[in-house]
Amino acid sequence: MKTLGFLGIDIGTQGLSVIFTNTELKILVSGEGGYEMIPGLDPECYEQQPSDWESALKNAMADLRKKMSSMEIDMEVLAIGISGQMHGEVLTNENGELVGPARLWCDSRNEIEGEELTKRLGTKCP
C-alpha cells in the first residue's frame, strides 16, 4: 500500500536535505547530500558549483529511498516543497547554461557596492 505524503527539499549553504512526511506532516524519513565551498578563494569569497547541488539531490534522494525501502514505505508524493539559501546568484547565458560558480549570500566582496545601492535606492540591498 502506498503512503501518501509530501516531499521536502532544503538546499542549504552547507548541505542538502530531503524529508518525506505523511499527510499529518509527521516526518517519516530523511536523506542528506553534501557539498563544499570552492577552495582557495579569498577569505571574503564564498562560492559553490551549482552542479554539486544537483549531485547532492541525487545522493539525498538515494539515501531517502534506501531508508524507505528498509522501512517498507512505498511513497506517493502529493506535493513537493523546496527551500534554499537566499541572496545567491547563479549566472547563466541566454540558453540557461551555467557560466560559472554561484556566489553565496555570505560572499562579501561586493559589500561597498551594496552599500552604495542601498543609499541610492533608499532600500536595503544585500
Image (cartoon, grey):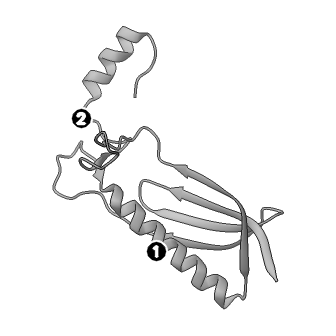
Q: Residue at x 53, y 79 (%)?
A: 63
Q: Residue at x 72, y 75 (%)?
A: 75
52 vs 16, left or right, is left
Q: Picture coordinates of residue 100 (x, y %)?
A: 24, 48
Vertical order, 22 against 125 (above or below):
below
Farthest residue toward the front?
Answer: 95
Say what secondary structure mark 2 lies in.
Answer: loop
Vertical order, 67 against 122 (above or below):
below
Q: Picture coordinates of residue 66 (x, y %)?
A: 58, 85
| Residue type, mark 1 in image | Asn
Q: Picture coordinates of residue 107 (x, y %)?
A: 30, 41
90 vs 122, left or right, is left
* Residue hosting label 1: 59
Vertical order, 93 against 101 (above or below):
above
Q: CA distance from mark 2 to mark 1?
A: 32 Å
Q: Residue at x 26, y 30 (%)?
A: 110
Q: Residue at x 48, y 62 (%)?
A: 16
* Residue hosting label 2: 109
| Circle 2 Cα neighbour tier, 10 Å, few/some/many (<14 / 14–19 / ≥20) | some
Earlier residue among tags 2 and 1? 1
Q: Picture coordinates of residue 50 (x, y %)?
A: 35, 55
| Residue type, mark 2 in image | Arg
- Of residue 54 and residue 96, the one placed in the foreground of this image is 96
- Of residue 105 and residue 101, the one placed in the foreground of this image is 101
Q: Nearer the viewer, mark 2 or mark 1?
A: 1
- Of residue 49 and residue 85, the one placed in the foreground of this image is 49
Say what secondary structure mark 1 lies in.
Answer: helix
- Check the picture and name the quadrant holding the C terminus: top left
